[in-house]
Image (spheres, helix red, strand yellow):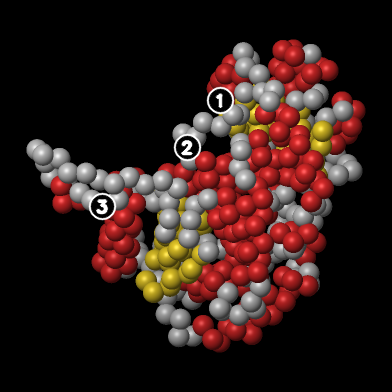
Amino acid sequence: MIKTDLTNAISELDFNKYNQQIAAIHQMIHDNSGVGHEFLGWVEWPLNYDKAELAKMKAVASQLTKEIDVLLVIGIGGSYLGSRAAIEMINGLYYQPQVEIIYIGNTMSSTYTQQVLDYVKNKEFGICVISKSGTTTEPAIAFRLCKDLLEQKKGKAVAKTRIIAVTDKAKGALKELANQEGYQTFIIPDDIGGRYSVLTPVGIFPMLVAGVNVDEVFAGAKLAYEDTFSPDLTNQAYRYALARYLLNTRDHYQSEMLVSYELQFQMLNEWWKQLFGESEGKDGKGLLPTSCIFSTDLHSLGQFIQEGTKNIIFETVIKINKPNGDLVLTADQENLDGLNYLAGKTLHSVNTIAMAGVVYAHHQSGNVPNIILEFATMDAKMFGYLSYWFMKACAMSAYLLKINPFNQPGVEIYKTNMFKLLGKPGK
């Protein structure tokens, strides 16, 4: 469901010299022998996810949607980016679901938090709080505020039936509170880190409440597992990983820009940035992941990409073969806007032709390499496929750099300093 076109990016003449290295890393990924192997649970997840837990999630989500107008999804980083990426990509930005999804706990902005609380105070709302520990500052603050409002509004007896905790199976502050209060809980697996967790209850439960067909999501992930099982460069995910590795380490590009021509892919771009940024940005290595939505950002960053400083960025462009919706352009008798030459064409075909023109301009005139990732569709099955595909590519890419794809030691430094400044006991 994803084809990797490197024609405008890099010569593949010397790819064969990496075959043994690719095969060895593939083996490490699948036999859990590489650094960080304790967090490789996502690799087999499309095959062995807990079917009973999924059935329970479906039942709880179905009941909850009958009772609420809004679900507050509380989480930060991988605890919300995956579900938001999926819901917006699949449903679109102006979809009218039975339950509105609002994301909170991903910022400490007092203005945003106050506005969310004001918005839901006269609505029927529920809470899905996602945290392995329950003590991460941003979601912990948001959960305390949202829980207090829900309990004041509905009373503790009703509130506890509308609070869903996605957390550790046995330990942590959130698990302890959930046991104490009687919240329904779903499990974050011990061997799957946050940015690789979108296919676990972390991402799946909010998707269910938003009306996403998660059976199709899992079907797509299973197909991606099968398609990325080849230990060689017929594997499209590995071709992408090797190309970006060579552009970085051999050709000295410092940044990769993920480009989409669909506005509803903006949060997918954000999920991708976290996946690759946290996985690769360590030991003084890695590409800086950035993103744009074209043609929108062509009218802001297009000038820099075309004629700005060279050998900094290359582009990875998502091409959609079949969009979720399309329009046929019609002729106008006056033709004052001069657009009659487009009559009879679909808007998606115009968008695709625009993409081809931009790729040509950026590569041929601007000397900016362009990797093209051709997506078959942009539906639930495609999301399941692409999420697993990118995770597999990311693991391969990080292992090529000889770094641990699954830790994030640098993230802890800001937390330590923040806690000291806030006067947290023991810090």
Which mark identifies residue 345?
3
Residue 70 vs residue 162: left or right?
Answer: left
> Does residue 191 show up?
yes
Of callouts 3 and 2, the N-terminal one? 2
Q: How many marks on residues?
A: 3
* Relative depth, front residue between 408 and 423: 408
In the image, residue 368 lies at what x, y percent? 35, 65
Residue 370 position (above or below residue 75): below
Q: Please state which amino acid type lies under the numbered disc 3.
A: Lys
Q: Secondary structure at mark 1?
A: helix
Marks 3/2: CA–CA distance: 24 Å
Of callouts 1 and 2, the N-terminal one? 2
Residue beneath disc 1: 112
Q: Secondary structure at mark 2?
A: loop
Q: Please state which amino acid type lies under the numbered disc 1.
A: Tyr
* Relative depth, front residue between 113 and 218: 218
Residue beneath disc 2: 93
Q: Please state which amino acid type lies under the numbered disc 2.
A: Leu
Which mark identifies residue 278?
none
In the image, residue 161 lies at what x, y percent? 79, 25
Q: Nearer the viewer, mark 1 or mark 2?
A: 2
In the image, residue 62 lies at what x, y percent? 71, 33
Residue positioned 60% across, 84% down in the render? 19
Of callouts 1 and 3, the N-terminal one? 1
Marks 1/3: CA–CA distance: 42 Å
